[in-house]
Image (cartoon, helix red, strand yellow):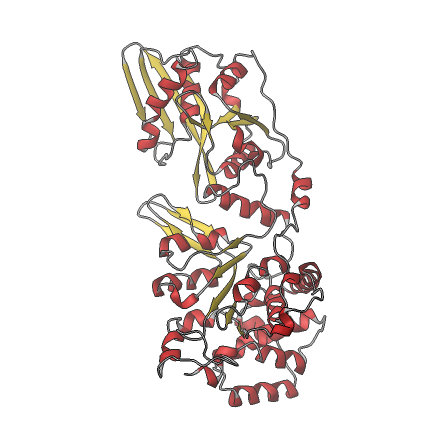
């Protein structure tokens, strides 16, 4: 007897339906074909034990299992339940009429229990697109799949529940999630707040500008000045995610297996902070079985690189292209996968190896040329992609002991959101451009027009402060963002002056 069950294979952040055809005929054999890897082929032993421990069995006949389409590689243990139900239906141990209506996925334990799987959200989206009635999967993944509307989602803990469901003995309990309610309830839930940071008003302002225009930012200052504390609070002032952004972010985390237990939709912007020992592949993604890297996990959120010069040069260089294109393509001999990577980069670093160059009180003990050598660990092309350079100085005891309540993240976020709304309207007809940081050279000339007085200020700054040529475009972009925060149609002289202050590393006193 021939029976078809349905599973799904995840590639990148999308899924493809896999048809598992089980044919049972006279003889004694077990053959699994269809470009399956070792983990899929090992399912035979897991299925056999799971069925035996639940008073069912694999029939002693010739069993041929084909996983179609046969030219797509099937990987992992998530097909255990798909194959097991196919074998039971083909051997008439369960009723087979309703099996074709569902996507069935799950890894089996030897006692018949089900372990959670990766990539559930893309699988559920594909199941709905292809007209399946529902999806049966491990209970720990049910909430994630239930984010997809108009799809019956059944979370199960044991294969026996699935058998009883198809035999019409015991119905399964459907998992229902009010997606919008869950999305809005967690929209602005953060563990950190700008109100926790005492003093550092100029740094807070720089981060507000960065958030409003989507600009990348680097904080440079001595140890203990508050760089990490400030960076961790950047995500709290970014505009709330839209539902589409939340869905995109959840898909990536689902594919990477980074979803929390019983989690539904990720509705707060991600904040990723990898250690400086990270490899190239771990940062941008890839591997023998391609997985999203840290830059994709930070999609629609913040990637924080603490102690930037300590990262390997090659690791930083592979990030240059994704910073421009906002996607990363992982290419292999037979296929290529594209992961989204639209993130805000915030980096921090000490000004020199000892950490006290330009310190107001402590003396730098580094030998001559050490400062420039330290700064040269970060290449010009990478620094070119960072719009805002801010020098962080230590706060005084008076500021530290101050008991007044500082401005909260919520108030800053309101101003940032208003500025982003202005930018959304401005770039409405431009695909791939959503904020000032993304504008092209042509758009820069059209949008960032400055007065004669502004031109004079910029010329003076370039000459006196020794600003580099590449700083020119960045200053114009940042000044446009400052103007948006002020709800100003034109870029005024004060906007340009403030933008010039955001280029610390281009000044002559950083030349070593």
- Counting from the top left corner in percent of width and height, residue 25 is at 33, 12
Quarter of the N terminus within the rendering = top left
> Residue 447, can we see it?
no
Looking at the image, which is closer to me, 363 or 27?
A: 363
* Extreme residue toward the left, this view: 28
Count of labels in the image: 0
- Counting from the top left corner in percent of width and height, residue 312 is at 35, 63
Which residue lies at the image location 39% right of the left edge and 72% below the top edge?
A: 379
Give the left or right position of residue 19, taking residue 26 as reference.
right
Looking at the image, which is closer to me, 410 or 28?
A: 410
Residue 79's quadrant in the figure? top left
- Counting from the top left corner in percent of width and height, residue 491 is at 66, 77
Residue 19's quadrant in the figure? top left
Residue 231's quadrant in the figure? bottom right
> Residue 366, can we see it?
yes
In the image, residue 289 above or below residue 57: below
Which residue lies at the image location 60% right of the left edge and 75% below the top edge?
A: 396
Which residue lies at the image location 33% right of the left edge and 16% below the top edge?
A: 63
- Counting from the top left corner in percent of width and height, residue 96 is at 48, 14
Looking at the image, which is closer to me, 109 or 407?
A: 407
């Amino acid at each position: 007897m021939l029976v078809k069950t349905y599973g799904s294979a995840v590639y990148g952040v999308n899924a493809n339906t896999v048809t598992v055809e089980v044919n049972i005929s006279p003889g004694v054999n077990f053959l699994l074909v269809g470009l399956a890897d070792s983990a899929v082929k090992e399912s035979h032993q897991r299925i056999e034990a799971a069925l035996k421990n639940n008073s069912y069995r694999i029939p002693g006949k010739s069993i041929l299992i084909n996983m179609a389409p046969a030219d797509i590689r099937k990987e992992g243990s998530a097909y255990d339940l798909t194959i097991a139900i196919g074998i039971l239906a083909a051997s008439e141990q369960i009723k087979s009429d309703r099996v074709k209506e569902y996507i069935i996925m799950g890894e089996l334990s030897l006692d018949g229990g089900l372990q959670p799987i990766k990539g559930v959200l893309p699988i559920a989206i594909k199941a709905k697109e292809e007209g399946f009635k529902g999806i049966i999967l491990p209970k720990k993944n049910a909430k994630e799949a239930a984010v997809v509307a108009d799809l019956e989602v059944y979370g199960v803990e044991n294969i026996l529940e699935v058998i009883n469901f198809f035999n019409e003995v015991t119905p399964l309990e459907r998992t229902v999630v009010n997606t919008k309610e869950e999305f809005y309830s967690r929209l602005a839930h953060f563990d950190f707040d700008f109100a926790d940071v005492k003093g550092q008003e100029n740094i807070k302002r720089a981060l507000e500008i960065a958030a409003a225009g989507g600009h990348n930012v680097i904080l440079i200052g001595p140890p203990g000045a508050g760089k990490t504390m400030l960076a961790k609070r950047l995500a709290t002032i970014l505009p709330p995610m839209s539902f589409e952004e939340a869905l995109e972010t959840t898909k990536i985390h689902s594919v990477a297996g980074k979803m929390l237990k019983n989690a539904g939709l990720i509705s707060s912007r991600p904040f990723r902070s990898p250690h400086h020992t990270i490899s190239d592949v771990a940062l941008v993604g890839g591997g023998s079985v391609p997985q999203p890297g840290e830059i994709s996990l930070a999609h629609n959120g913040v990637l924080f690189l603490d102690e930037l010069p300590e990262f390997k040069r090659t690791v930083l260089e592979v990030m240059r292209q994704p910073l421009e294109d906002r996607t990363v393509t992982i290419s292999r001999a037979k296929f290529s996968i594209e992961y989204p990577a639209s993130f805000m980069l915030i980096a921090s670093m000490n000004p020199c190896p000892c950490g006290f160059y330009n310190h107001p009180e402590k003396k730098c003990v580094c030998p001559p040329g050490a400062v420039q050598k330290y700064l040269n660990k970060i290449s010009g092309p990478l620094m070119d992609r960072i719009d805002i350079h801010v020098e962080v100085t230590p706060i005084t005891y008076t500021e530290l002991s101050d008991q007044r309540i500082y401005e909260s993240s919520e108030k800053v976020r309101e101003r940032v959101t208003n500025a982003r709304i202005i930018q959304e309207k401005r770039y409405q007809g431009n695909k791939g451009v959503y904020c000032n940081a993304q504008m092209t050279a042509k758009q820069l000339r059209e949008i960032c027009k400055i007065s004669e007085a502004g031109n004079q200020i910029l010329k003076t700054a370039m000459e006196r402060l020794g600003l580099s040529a590449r700083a020119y475009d960045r200053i114009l972009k940042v000044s446009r963002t400052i103007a948006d925060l002020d709800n100003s149609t034109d870029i005024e002289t004060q906007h340009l002056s403030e933008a010039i202050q955001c280029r610390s590393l281009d000044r002559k006193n950083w030349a070593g």
